[in-house]
Amino acid sequence: MSDDLIGGLYPKPKHPNAPDFVIGGLSINVAQFREWMKSHIAANPGEDWINVQMKVSKAGKGYAAIDTWKPDAAKAEAPQQAPSFAGDDDDIPF
């Protein structure tokens, strides 16, 4: 599977001296990211969100890729309806 790389977005691992609430860093090359974003918007009109996966290459460098997973509408379960208890008063012991 090929990754849809996000240009100009570079994840960084957590620094060893960083506090526990820090999970990592992110560097953005504005010029590269701007160009990538322009092309992404042109190719995906009407999309309001981009889901991103932060990954590590085999060489140990961080990179960002688009998470293209979408739920399968055909497999999505219909919301369950609450059971109706109308007319079941005869079973109440009080």
Image (spheres, rainbow, N blue to C red):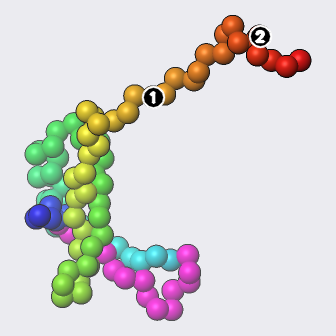
Mark toward the viewer: 1 or 2: 2
What residue is shown with label 2? 90
Secondary structure state at the residue bearing disc 1: loop
Please name the amino acid that badge 1 sits on: Pro
83 is higher (above) or lower (below) than 14: above
Q: Is residue 38 left or right of residue 25?
A: left
Q: Does residue 66 belong to the magenta stretch?
A: no
Question: Foreground residue, 27 or 1?
Answer: 1
> From which residue to which does the magenta span run?
7-21
* Cα gap from disc 1 to disc 2, whole angstroms: 29 Å
- Residue 18: image location, x then y, percent: 51, 86
Q: Residue at x 61, y 16 (%)?
A: 84
Q: Earlier in the sequence, mark 1 or mark 2?
A: 1
Identify which residue is drawn at 38% across, 33% down: 77
The front one of 61 and 43 is 61
Residue 82 versus residue 14 in the image, above or below = above
Q: Position of residue 91 (x, y in %)?
A: 76, 16
Which residue is label 1 attached to? Answer: 79
| Mark 2 nearby-residue class (10 Å; few <14, some 14–19, many ≥20) | few
Q: Are marks 1 and 2 in contact (CB under 8 Å)?
A: no
Where in the figure is residue 8, as x and y percent of width and height? 20, 69
Residue ID at (42%, 77%): 24
- The amino acid beneath tag 2 is Asp
Q: Is residue 89 left or right of 37 when viewed as pictured? A: right
